[in-house]
Image (cartoon, grey):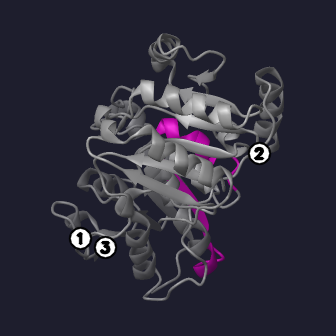
Amino acid sequence: MTAPKKILVVALDNLGDTVMATAILRPVRRLFPAASVGMFVKSYAADLLADHSLVDRVHAADPFWDVSPGRAAGSFGAFWSTLRQIRRERYDTAILLNTEWRRALAAAVARIPSRVGYDRRNARRFLTSAVAETQPAPHFIEAHRRLVAELAGGRSAAEGFVPRLEFSSREMGWWERWSAGARVEKGNYVVIHPYSGDQRKNWPVPAWAELVERLRQRDRGARVVFICSGAEKAGLTSALDHEGLTGAEVVAGAPLRHIKAVISQARLLIGGDSGPGHIAAALGVPVLSLFGPGRPERSGPRGHAPVKFLQAEPLSTLDVDTVTRAAFEMMDGAVKEDA
């Protein structure tokens, strides 16, 4: 097999999936050092990859058949325009990390001659290399490893498959200005992401409010920063006020590059099964991840810092005492990674 010269990693999924896709970048670079690497992601995820040293080009478009949390479906015209851009780049290889048939077809329409993905119904006809999936399904990152091995003719990379995000001096400059106004310092605040695109994955706001009070009681200098979308801000602040929680910093509707900067300097991130947990882990920030439905062994965050999972179904039955103990342990550095 001829070594690829231009590789496109197709990761047209939500934030967590985009972060997990970065796990293959360093191994791919080691296996194919002469190749350039591009990524094809959803528009709202593109900021995650800004200035990433392992990505030469980012192509962004929202699939017209899919909807991202809090966003409308993409338009056919915008998607087609991005495919034409990709075609002009003359990629010779596509790695389709979530091999849904329309994504595989898009890679074929973009005239990418070698297309590696999973052997799935309707998708296989658009692939040149179809990799059988194993059962039970492993963690997504372990599955991605098999696609890279297929591309490399069975060779494996000595480099570990670990998600990695980077932040630029521009993002750090924004953080310095924001932190001065928010009265936080590097490593002295906890980030909480209370929401997700699925209500079943959301711990109740009263429980979050009680957790914050306990964090404050333990460490009077501790600061808590909530992150949420702009549409969620009014509901969150109203709920926190109702619980009598005052003085919490809320970062709402900020560009993703700013959210990344806020997370990057935190002592700990606590949240549900959603994108910010993956972002934190990939930035080397410890994560306490609260799971309701779902399989953390399949889709939980991975990175260069400890990750601990607490799971209950329904998630509302997860008690504050349990979460508080886990948070204190992680803040004290006493927890090893669960993943």
Residue 324 visible:
yes
Tell me which residue sits at (61%, 25%) in the image. Answer: 254
Task: State whether residue 141 is above or below residue 174.
Answer: below
Which residue has dot 2 on it? 168
Residue designated by label 1 = 119
Q: Position of residue 69 (x, y in %)?
A: 38, 32
Q: Is residue 61 visible?
A: no
Amino acid identity at mark 1? Asp
Residue 268 image offset from top left, x and y in percent: 63, 46
What amino acid is at disc 2? Ser
- Whichever of labels 1 and 2 marks the residue nearer the N terminus, that label is 1
Badge nearest the viewer, 1 or 2: 2
Whether pointer 1 and pointer 2 mark residues with C-beta atoms closer than 8 Å, the reply is no
Instruction: Work out whether 211 lies above or below 106.
Output: above
Residue at position x 48%, y 65% in the image:
338
Question: Quick check: 337 above or below 174?
Answer: below
Residue that mark 3 sits on: 128
Q: Which mark is in front, 1 or 3?
A: 1
Question: Closer to the N terminus: mark 1 or mark 3?
Answer: 1
> Could you say whether the residue bearing mark 2 is in a helix, strand or loop?
loop
Q: Position of residue 159 (x, y in %)?
A: 61, 78
Q: Which residues are magenta?
A: 29-52
Q: As drawn, which residue projects farthest toward the left?
A: 121
Quick one: SS at disc 3?
Answer: loop
- Distance in Å between CA atoms under marks 1 and 3: 10 Å
